[in-house]
Image: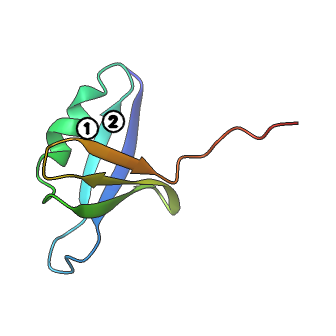
Amino acid sequence: MNMHHYILKVAGEPSSKPIEFAFDAENPSRVFDILENVRPDRWATLWDGTRMLGQIMRQKCGSWIVAGKTQPSQA
């Protein structure tokens, strides 16, 4: 199994504790099961240790917006 440990922090909810979880690259749908706990219209940041990997927002319609994804540099 290819496991990575990440932390999910939800913006605007200081009372909520960061969600720590292990991400299995072979079963990525588990991440979305965990993210179902995020309230709609809230940005959440995904952290790998001290490095922010990106931001996601859960919309009220249930879909997701992904922001801050690293794009490959073009030479």
> How far across and how far down the image is residue 24, in percent?
33, 28
For the N terminus, the quadrant is top left
Q: Is residue 24 above or below residue 45?
A: above
> How far across and how far down the image is residue 72, in percent?
70, 38
Task: Check disc 2 and give the amino acid type.
Answer: Phe
Image point (30%, 64%), residue name: 9
Farthest front residue in view: 61
Q: Secondary structure at mark 1?
A: helix
Image point (24%, 77%), residue name: 12
Image point (77%, 41%), residue name: 73
Q: Is residue 70 above or below residue 33?
A: below
Q: Is residue 52 above or below residue 29?
A: below
Mark 1 touches mark 2? (CB < 8 Å): yes
Question: Is 68 on the left-hand or right-hand side of 13?
Answer: right
Question: Is 66 on the left-hand or right-hand side of 62?
Answer: right
Foreground residue, 39 or 17? 39
> How far across and how far down the image is residue 37, in percent?
11, 52
Q: CA distance from mark 1 to mark 2?
A: 7 Å
Return the mark for residue 31.
Answer: 1
Q: Which residue is mark 2?
A: 23
